[in-house]
Image (cartoon, rainbow, N blue to C red):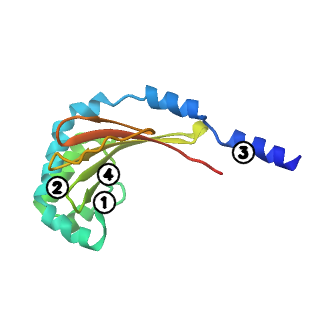
Amino acid sequence: MGRITLVIFMWLVAGCSNDDLTSKFNNHKFDQGVIDKLPVYDSLANVLLENFPSIRQRIKVESYYSYWPAEHVNDLYKVLPKPGADKVKQYLNQLGAGYIYGFDVYKDSTIKIHLKEIYFQADHLHIREKLSFYPTGTNIRKREFPIKDTILNKNWQYWISFDKQEFF
């Protein structure tokens, strides 16, 4: 009898079913505001690439450079020359909190911009929206369920991941 109770408990705690995940996946749209702001993201990526030699020094210590404005307020000025850090701050302000909460720069100079994160507590589901910038315009891979993506141009991929938290 205890095993049956445990199985029922696990089934109830598991949250959203695959049908719920598929439904959220199918109904969650790419944000047109993100797409409209692509020129600002381009400017941000260009400043980061212009300052890549400074960023590369940090990447030698870690596998990539990550900047989260809410956590690393003055970190930019430790990594980038002041004019570059000032421009990055300017573009972050121009984008606004609803359109960026951090970015990562990798040793191959690709850039991942973290746009927004939504958590559905009842379903134990994280939806994370990101932009990836590929400087060479190559190696953009098609993502598969539970990630949806769209190619915005030869350098930009907009993608959304649907991450279900499992407790068991």
| Image vertical order of residue 26 relative to residue 82, above or below | above
**Residue 81 in view:** no
Q: Position of residue 27 (x, y in %)?
A: 45, 26
Observer-side mark, 3 or 2, equals 3
Residue indicated by mark 1: 66
Amino acid tagged 4:
Gly
Amino acid found under the numbered disc labelled 1: Ser
| SS type, badge 3 | helix
Sequence-wise, the earlier of marks 3 and 4 is: 3
**Where is residue 112 shown, x and y percent of the image?**
28, 50
- Asked if the residues shown at circle 1 and circle 4 are in contact, with their CB atoms under 8 angstroms apart, the answer is yes
Residue 10 disc label: 3
Q: CA distance from mark 2 to mark 4?
A: 13 Å
- Name which residue lies at 29% across and 63% down: 64
Q: Alpha-carbon neighbours of circle 2 within 10 Å: few (<14), some, or many (≥20)? A: many
| Residue type highlighted by circle 2 | Leu
User: Can you identify the residue that label 4 sits on?
Assistant: 102
Position of 93 with respect to 30 (left or right) is: left
> Residue 166 at what x, y percent from top left?
60, 48
